Image (cartoon, coloured by chain):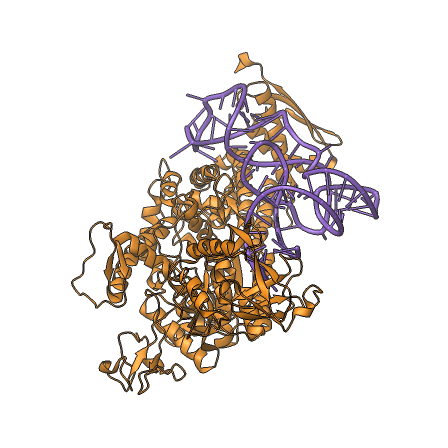
Chain colours: A orange, B purple
RNA sequence: GGGCGUUUAGCUCAGUUGGAAGAGCGCCUCCCUUACAAGGAGGAGGUCGGGGGAUCGAGACCCUCAACGCCCACCA
């Protein structure tokens, strides 16, 4: 049963009390009670489990929660699961640092291994299985902490439906999704030059790249002419790749080089003959207008190499060092193999950075460096989590086809409803800029393995062209520890046996299936039918090119459909210097302190004030305002219930002032509902708040006396009825934002949770507010304000009796005032009959106060 | 190099069909008023980034410039 307001309402302890009650009562449980059209399903971003949640998470997840709560109150069965993104590199790195271990896949599993209490100076090498086990232990601890924080924040998640991206369900879904793409010919394997992070020892995809400005230098280097032609000078920032040079290239229209096309030049130090070729991408304005093509210095090299059908002469290995070479036997053909070998041996084994230093000295000595290096800064490609520039190495990798489908994927992007709409531009820019298929294999450990084995031929070589795949019913599988059907484990790596694919999938290859994963794709047809395609994807803008794009790709191929209809993009949280808050910048605020200091509702208020897609400053001031608002809701509710008895529907709202207030409330309900329908939660909050303060400051003051019973019974009942109605509506309008305090005040007079109550509608106000003149409230508030100002100006108490008031205003406004004049006089402590009106152009009020002695 | 966004009071931001510049914080003054002193009432403070233009009328529409932020880019 409903309780009564306490003597002294407080915000303290609301989080603990109500989150426990919601849990017991199953307030946010997804009931499977409705068909697809009665369900609202949310594809929640699974936060990366790599330490702790920060205030940016609190910010954006609050936005989603407000929408979820709104939809629930609109009568939808809200499907709102939470996931943890625990697979992938962030976790591996954290485990390495946390336990002081490193994965060595050549080692055997040690069932008795226990990590040291504190990481030692030397990393302990452990087997892949031991490493993966540690990853599992650590993420489980983190996930508990994350859930605690989310519960404290009041997310209305159904906690019985959590998932992880490394869990068994995710492994099944990711492997099934992969096998389907393979069967459809949309996933393929290829030996190709790929961007490679030397430190992580893995290939990375275009979506994980970022540019960083780095110092470098132009080196002007002479290539010797042949056939009696002049020498040519090229400029390069990577002279250490001269041994990998396969051609020079200039623009076909460049008159300086036109007569050189088809002829050869000789590389300095190594004497390798390479052709001079023409290609549109060569920029006559850059450097000397002629460039060296190496295998491979940058992505342009890859383009040239592919389009000009050039040979591969790779020198950089996966560890970032120059390989050893035999110039007599390998694919290098030098005019002077002895000199070439001697020169190259100076570089072999060095890192690219060291090799560059050495080769510049050698070129200077040989006279082929025609000018001293010219320092520049230039953008260099990095893996977003990496610390050294990426190299390009040739390796066997899995890809998902995206390039061929670019147009269809662009159409998918415009079918989506973007909030805010301009975010679609980022998607479009990304898809239009795709320059390769999506590389999904990673040479790492804590990820989902490719469910693929390869036959080993009688001669011991591996046949990559005839992959062995499992039945879907056998998923998930681990090819590195299980044999494929028809083989025994003893045949691993043996002639006529098999090998497992050693790689794991890119984390996005799993995350791109979150809609399928949470909806029970192929595992829970009933759930799937009720939830998929989903309604909403909320996420941040910097992962449009990764998470959003890849999710669209997967649903496009699997279902020929969008994975969801709406996408709501949150902005970032900026620190007071307007810098993005991020861990690497060290300016992150951990949320729990603020949740405890201001209360969850207050922090949510700050978060919900940030408009969709707009970067928002971290602002404790807004949290203070939110806290004050929550306290105001407590007190206003207590007062209103005290004078109104909390009853609605027992009396007519007959007085003009009360009807005017309800008319404004009616507008508010329309506004807030429209705003929420357009995913503009911030607008809904702002409108509700504005109404609420005028409800407290003006309406409550104006009707206080009448509600207490100072006039006739009809007037008193009208005020009480309007107060209770207003309170009920306001409590529900605030509920998506301030779930704790609204639940508290709702419990004082209503049964059940406010979060399961019906969102207010105009219909429920219809009878009381229909056709009312809203200006009665405005004029009454204006005149009361003028009386207060007079008292304030004269430094008198607001209780000071007023002996005379002259109000001038237009006829229509005076007519409106006449309908509320008793309330105005009572609220302003104006003596009976002392308020007179005169026609005027605009509102002026003259106020005479009782002399101080008479008080 | 291309694109998107932002620019309104000292600060954080509203201002949705163009119609007399707003809120909160901070600051100042006053008030213990039985819902609320973690409060209430009132006040000061802005040529709405600059410059053009269409309009009776622009913070809002068009053009242009600038600053800041972000996204994308084949970066020799």
Q: Quadrant of residue A94?
A: bottom left
Q: Answer whether residue A144 is visible to the viewer in this image.
A: no
Residue for point 63% across, 57% down: A286
For the residue pair A612 and A644, the one nearer the viewer reads as A612
Residue A402 versus residue A231 in the image, above or below: below
Q: Is residue A813 visible?
A: yes
Residue A581 appears left or right of A135: right
* Residue A210 placement, left or right of A791: left
Q: Residue at x 58, y 33 (%)?
A: A823
Location of residue A495 with respect to A819 vertically, above or below: below
What is the total number of numbered labels drawn onto the structure image? 0
Task: Give the left or right position of residue A789, taking residue B26 as reference.
Answer: right
* Nearer-the-camera pick, A831 or A757: A757
Q: Nearer the viewer, residue A767 or A53?
A: A53
Comparing A326 with A457, the one in front is: A326
Question: Looking at the image, which residue sits at the far left?
Answer: A112
- Against A332, residue A209 (above or below) is above
Asked whether, in this view, residue A208 is left or right of residue A485, the answer is right
Residue A743 on image: x %, y %: 40, 48
Instruction: Say if A364 sits above or below A295 in the image.
Output: above
Q: Determine the residue located farthest toward the top in the rendered image.
A: A853
Picture quadrant of residue A204: bottom left
Q: Residue A737: image x %, image y %?
A: 46, 49
Give the percent coordinates (x, y) of residue A753. Answer: 39, 53
Residue A202, percent across and down? Answer: 39, 64
């Amino acid at each position: 049963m409903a309780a009564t307001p306490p003597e002294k309402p407080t915000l303290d302890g609301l989080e603990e009390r109500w989150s426990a009650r919601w849990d017991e009562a199953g307030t946010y449980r997804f009931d499977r009670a409705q068909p697809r059209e009665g369900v609202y399903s949310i594809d929640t971003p699974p936060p990366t489990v790599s330490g702790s949640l920060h205030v940016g998470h609190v910010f954006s997840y609050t936005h989603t929660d407000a929408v979820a709560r709104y939809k629930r109150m609109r009568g939808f069965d809200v499907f709102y699961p939470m996931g943890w993104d625990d697979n992938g590199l962030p976790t591996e790195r954290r485990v390495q640092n946390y336990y002081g271990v490193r994965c060595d896949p050549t080692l055997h599993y040690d069932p008795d291994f226990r990590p040291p209490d504190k990481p030692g100076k030397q990393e302990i090498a452990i087997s892949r299985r031991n490493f993966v086990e540690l990853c599992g232990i650590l993420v489980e601890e983190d996930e508990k902490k994350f859930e605690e924080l989310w519960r404290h924040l009041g997310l209305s998640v159904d906690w019985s439906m959590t998932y992880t991206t490394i869990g068994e369900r995710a492994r099944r879904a990711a492997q099934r999704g992969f096998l389907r793409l393979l069967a459809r010919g949309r996933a393929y394997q290829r030996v190709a030059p790929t961007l490679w992070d030397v430190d992580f020892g893995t290939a990375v995809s275009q979506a994980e790249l970022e540019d960083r400005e780095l110092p470098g230098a132009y080196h002007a280097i002479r290539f010797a002419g042949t056939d009696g032609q002049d020498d040519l000078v090229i400029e390069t920032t990577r002279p250490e790749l001269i041994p990998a040079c396969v051609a020079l290239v200039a623009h076909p229209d460049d008159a300086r080089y036109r007569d050189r096309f088809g002829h050869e030049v000789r590389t300095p130090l190594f004497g390798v003959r390479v052709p001079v070729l023409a290609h549109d991408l060569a920029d006559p304005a850059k450097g000397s207008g002629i460039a060296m093509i190496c295998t491979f210095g940058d992505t342009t090299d890859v383009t040239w190499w592919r389009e000009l059908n050039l040979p591969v002469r790779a020198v950089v290995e996966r560890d970032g060092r120059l390989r050893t070479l035999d110039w007599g036997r390998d694919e290098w053909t030098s005019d002077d193999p002895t000199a070439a070998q001697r020169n190259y041996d100076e570089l072999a084994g060095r890192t690219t950075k060291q090799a560059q230093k050495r080769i510049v000295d050698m070129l200077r000595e040989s006279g082929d460096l025609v000018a001293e290096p010219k320092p520049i800064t230039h953008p260099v490609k990095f893996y977003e989590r990496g610390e050294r520039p990426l190299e390009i190495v040739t390796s066997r990798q899995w890809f998902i086809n995206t390039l061929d489908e670019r147009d269809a994927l662009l159409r998918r992007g415009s079918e989506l409803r973007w909030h805010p709409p301009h975010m679609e531009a980022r998607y479009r820019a990304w898809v239009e800029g795709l320059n390769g298929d999506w590389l999904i294999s990673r040479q790492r450990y804590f990820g989902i393995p490719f469910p693929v084995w390869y036959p080993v031929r009688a001669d011991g070589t591996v046949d990559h062209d005839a992959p062995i795949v499992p039945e879907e019913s056998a998923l998930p599988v681990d090819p590195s520890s299980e044999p494929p059907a028809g083989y025994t484990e003893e045949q691993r790596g043996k002639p006529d046996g098999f090998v497992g694919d050693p790689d794991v999938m890119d984390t996005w290859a799993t995350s791109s299936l979150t809609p399928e994963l949470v909806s029970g794709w192929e595992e829970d047809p009933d759930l799937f039918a009720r939830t998929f395609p989903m309604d909403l994807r909320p996420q941040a803008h910097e992962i449009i090119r990764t998470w959003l794009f890849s999710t669209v790709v997967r649903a496009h191929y699997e279902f020929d459909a969008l994975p969801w209809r709406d996408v709501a993009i949150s902005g970032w949280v900026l620190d007071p210097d307007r810098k993005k808050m991020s861990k690497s910048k060290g300016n992150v605020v951990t949320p729990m302190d603020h949740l405890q200091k201001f209360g969850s509702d207050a922090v949510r208020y700050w978060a919900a004030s940030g408009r969709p897609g707009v970067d928002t400053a971290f602002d404790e001031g807004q949290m203070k305002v939110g806290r004050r608002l929550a306290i105001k809701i407590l007190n206003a509710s207590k007062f209103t219930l005290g004078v109104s008895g909390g009853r609605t529907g027992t009396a007519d709202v007959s007085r003009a002032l009360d009807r005017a207030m309800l008319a404004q409330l009616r507008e508010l309900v329309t506004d807030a509902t429209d705003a929420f329908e357009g995913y503009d939660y911030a607008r809904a909050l702002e409108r509700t708040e504005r109404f609420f303060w005028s409800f407290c400051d003006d309406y409550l003051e104006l009707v206080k006396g009448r509600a207490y019973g100072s006039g006739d019974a009809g007037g008193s009942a009208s005020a009480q009825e309007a107060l209770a109605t207003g309170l009920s509506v306001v409590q529900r309008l605030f509920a998506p934002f301030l779930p704790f305090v609204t639940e508290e005040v709702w419990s004082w007079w209503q049964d059940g949770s406010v979060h399961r109550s019906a969102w207010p509608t105009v219909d429920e106000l219809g009878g009381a507010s229909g056709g009312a003149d809203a200006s009665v409230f405005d004029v009454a508030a204006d005149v009361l304000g003028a009386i207060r100002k007079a008292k304030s100006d004269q430094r008198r108490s607001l209780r000071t009796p007023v002996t005379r008031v002259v109000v001038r205003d237009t006829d229509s406004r005076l007519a409106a005032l006449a309908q509320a004049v008793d309330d105005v006089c009572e609220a302003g402590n104006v003596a009976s009959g002392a308020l007179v009106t005169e026609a005027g152009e605009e509102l002026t009020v003259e106020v005479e106060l009782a002399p101080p002695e008479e008080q």
